[in-house]
Image (cartoon, rainbow, N blue to C red):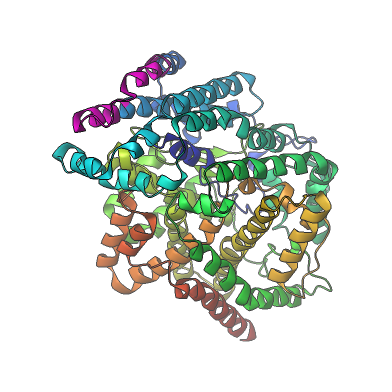
Amino acid sequence: MKLINQKIMRVILMTMFISSIGLTNFQLFAQEDTGGLIKRSDIDPKYTWNLKDIYETEDMWEADFKLVQSKIPGYEKFEGTLGNSAADLLAYLKFDEEVGTKLGHVFLYAFLAKDLDLADQKYQAVFERTQGLLSKYSEATAFFTPEVLAIPESKLKDFLAQDNLKSYALYFDNILRTKDHILSKEMEELLALSSPVQQVPYNVFSMFKNADIQYPKVKDDEGNDSQISDGRYYAALYSSDRDYRERVYRGYYEPYMEYKNTLVAMFTGNLKSINFDAKARKYKSDRAAALDANNIPLTVYDNLVKTAVDNAEPLHKWCAMKKKVLGLEDMHAYDTYVTLFPSVTKEYTYDEGVEIVLKALEPLGKDYQASLKKAFDNRWIDVYETKGKRSGAYSSGTTYGKHPYVLLNWNGTLNDVFTLAHEMGHNMHSYYTGLNQPYAYADYSIFVAEVASTMNEALLLDYLIANAETKEEKLSLIEKNLNNITTTFYRQTRFAQFEQMVHEMVEKDEPLTSEKLCEMYGKLYQDYWGPEMTVDEEETYTWARIPHFYYNFYVYQYATSFAASQALAAKIKAEGQPAIDSYLKFLKAGSSMYPIDVLKSAGVDMNSPEVVIAVTKKMDELLGQMENLLSE
C-alpha cells in the first residue's frame, strides 16, 4: 500500500494557511447595498483554475473513477503472495502505483471542483463519491502492511537487495519501524471501514464554516452595510477605524458563540476519533501516534512549546509597544493586526503582486524563476473571493503526475502579496518533488511543509526592506516581520499547546464543555500576550472556528518550519550559491529521507533548541530596531 491515506490527507489539509488579509480592495466586490461578493462568471478566466490540466472533460474524470473502481478488486490476487518472491512484491508495488496515481488524480479534481462553490450540490456529490472510492481502496489494501510485516526481516532484506527493489529501502523501513502499531489484517480492514465515519466531524465543521454559517451585517468604515465573511473579517482587523474593527470582530464570533454546543460536539467528536485510532494502534498518546507518522521525536514538540513559553517576553513587549503607540487604554485582540504606521498604505493588484514575488525570489535562481512563471502563466492559481468558495488560502500539495494548484482569496493588500509568496513556496516544493521523485517518494512530510512557504516570505521581506523608500515604510516592514513571528511562531505554538491539552483531557476521559474550552484557551492567550492584553469573551471561542484543530497535531509544524526557514534564509544570505543549491535539493527530496534528515541535509538540526530560540532573539532585535527608528 502506498500509504495513500497520508498522501490524501496531505491534499485535504492543503497546508491551509489562513492568511491575515489586509484592507479590502473594493473593486473585487459588487457595489451593492448588500455588499455581495463578485460573481465567478464576471472574473477573467486567467485568474481562475484550469482544471482541464487534470481532466479535459468530466467524462474523462468519470472514466478514471470507473477505472479505479474496476481495478480495486484486483488487489485480491496479491493477497498472500507478497512474501513469495521479490518479483511478486514488485508486481504489487507497480499495480498499486498505477491505481494510486489515477486515484490521486480523481481525488484532486473532485476536491478542487468542490472548493470553488461549497454550496454546489453537484460537486459535493462528486467529492462524496470520491471519498467512498477512497474507503474501498483502503479496505482493499488493508492486507498489505500486515502481510509485509509477516515476512521474516532477513527475507525482506534479501528482496530489497535486488536491483529493482533497492529504491524502496526507506519505504519499507518506514513500515518496519511502526511494526508494533500495525494490527492484524482483520483489524486493519475494520479501521479502514471506520475511516468515512471518522471524517464526519471535520466534514460537518467544514460545511458549517464555509457554506451554512450566517454572519451578520455591520456598518463598514464608510457607513455602508457589509456582509461579514472570512475575507472581510481579516480585512477589518487592519482597518484604522477601531470601532469598525470591534464591530466586525464581535459580529464574526456571534455564530460561533450561538452554536457553541454544536461546535463542542463536532470538536469533541474529532478528538475522540483521533484517540480511537491511537488506542487501537497501541500508542501511549494521541500525540505520540501523530508524530510517529513522520518519525518526529516528541522532544521536538516539547522543546518548541517550552522554549516559546519560556521566551514569551518579546511578545509581551510587542503588545505593550502597540498599546502605547496606538494610545490605547486597553489592548484587545482586534487591535493586534492594525498597523502602527497608517501613512504607509498601498493596494496591490494581483498582477502587481506577481511581479513583486518574482523579483523577491530571484535569489533562488533561474530555474526556480522559470517554474514560478510557468505556474503564473498557466492558471495554477484561483485568485479572487466568490460566493461559496472555500475561505483562506492553500496549495494542493503533490499529486503524482499532475501539477499543484493554489487557492487564494485576494483582497489587494500587502498581506495578500505575502500570502501569494507563501503559497507559491508550497506550490514549488510540491512541483519540484513531483518532478524529481518516483511515486513512492513523490510527496513530502507535513513536518517540512511550511519551510518553503515561510522561506519565500523571508526573502520577500528582505526584498521589500531593501527597496523601502522612507523610514516609515521600513518601520512598517519591520512591523510585518514582527507580525510574522507573532502569528506563525507564537500563535501556532499556542495552538499546539492548546491541542496537546485538550487531547490529554480526552485521553483521561475528562469532559469537554464550551466553558472549559474557553477557559483554557483564554488563559493561554493571556499568558502568551502578557499582562497588557485584555482578553474578550469572543477570543476565548477561537477553538470553535480554527479548522487546523481538526488536523491532528498539525499546527506545531508551522512554528518548527518557520524556525527552520529563518535559519535557511540566513544561510543563503551568508553563504550564497552553496546554500541555494542545498535548499533546492531540499525542495526536490520529497520523502526520500525522513523529514528530520531532509532538514539536516539542508543544514538545519531541529533537535537543537537553539534554532527555536533564535526566532525569539530575532523578535527582540527587531523590537530594538523599531524603538531606535521611532526615537529618531
- Which quadrant would the N terminus be assigned to in this image? top left
| Quadrant of res 364 | bottom left
Tally the numbered discs. 0
Q: Is residue 133 left or right of residue 172?
A: right
Q: In this view, does 332 lie to the left or right of 204?
A: right
Q: Does 622 appear above or below 278?
A: below
At x 30%, y 49%, the residue is 592
- Which quadrant would the C terminus be assigned to in this image? bottom right
Q: Give the range drawn in magenta.
A: 67-95
Is 549 in the magenta?
no
Residue 135 coordinates in the image, percent (x, y): 51, 26
At x 56%, y 51%, the residue is 416
Residue 462 coordinates in the image, percent (x, y): 45, 67
At x 48%, y 75%, the residue is 614
At x 60%, y 59%, the residue is 492
Residue 173 coordinates in the image, percent (x, y): 32, 48
Residue 1 shows in the view: no
Q: In this view, does 530 lie to the left or right of 309?
A: right
